[in-house]
Amino acid sequence: MEHKFNYRTPVLLLFMLLIIGLRVIAPLSPDFKFIANFSGIGAVALFGGAYFKNKVNAFLLPILVLFVSDLGLVLTMGLDYGFYSGWYYTYIAFILMVMVGHLIIKQVTPQSVLISGLVGVLIHWIVSDLGVWYGSTVYPQTISGFWACLVAAIPYEKNFLYGTLGYSALLFGVFETLKVKYPALSTKNTVIS
C-alpha cells in the first residue's frame, strides 16, 4: 500500500493565512478608512468551502483563520475592533459563506466563483448586520430599523464585495494555475491510500 503526502491541505491553509495576514496589517495603512472591509476574509470562506473535501477542515480552518486574524486586529487596533458587540453574528455569516462555497463551487469556473461571491456577500450583509441591529440603541427594533441598519452598512458591504470578488479571483485563479503545474495539489493525487 503506497502512502502519498497530502500537499493540498498545507498549501490551501498557507494561501488562506497569506490573505488573512493582509487583513491584520491593513489597519497600519494611512488609507485604512478607505480600505476598511476590503479584505479577503470572504474569499477565504468561499475558498475553504470549495477546496477542502473534508467537511471539518472546510468549516473549521476558515473560521480558525478568521479568529486568528481577529486576535491580530485586537493586538493592532484594540479589543473593540476584533471582538465588538455582536461579533458572533459575523462568525455565523462566515460559516454560512463556507457553506455557500461548498454548495455552489462544485467546479471552479469564473461563473461559480462570481455567483458564490455575490450570494456569500449578501448573506454576510444580512446576518452580520442583524448582529449590529439586534438590541441596538441606535436602530429601532423594528423592520424599518433593521432596514436602516442595512442601508447604513452599504458602504462597508460594497468594500467587502469588492474585496471578496477580487481576492476570490486571486485565490482561485492562482490555486487552479498551480494545480495544472503541480498535479499533487489535485484531489485525485493527494488521497492517502
Image: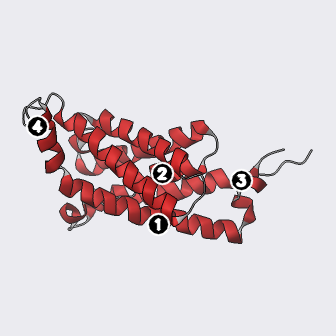
Q: At x 19% / y 54%, what residue is drawn? A: 154
In primary-sequence order, the first of circles 1 and 4 is: 4
Residue 106 appears in the figure: yes
Residue under label 2, please give it.
46
Above or below — where is 166 with respect to 79?
A: below
Q: At x 64% / y 44%, what residue is drawn? A: 53
In primary-sequence order, the first of circles 1 and 3 is: 1
In primary-sequence order, the first of circles 4 and 3 is: 4
Mark 2 to mark 3: distance in Å? Answer: 17 Å
- Residue 150 spot, x, y in % from top left: 18, 45
Q: Mark 3 packing: few (<14 Cα in 10 Å), some, or many (20+)?
A: some
| Local secondary structure at mark 3 | helix
| Local secondary structure at mark 4 | helix
Instruction: Specify the amino acid type for callout 4.
Output: Ser
Residue 20 appears in the figure: no
Residue under label 3, please give it.
187
The disc at residue 144 is: 4
Mark 2 to mark 4: distance in Å? Answer: 31 Å
Mark 1 to mark 4: distance in Å? Answer: 35 Å
Instruction: Specify the amino acid type for callout 2.
Output: Leu
In primary-sequence order, the first of circles 1 and 2 is: 2
Above or below — where is 151 with respect to 136?
A: below
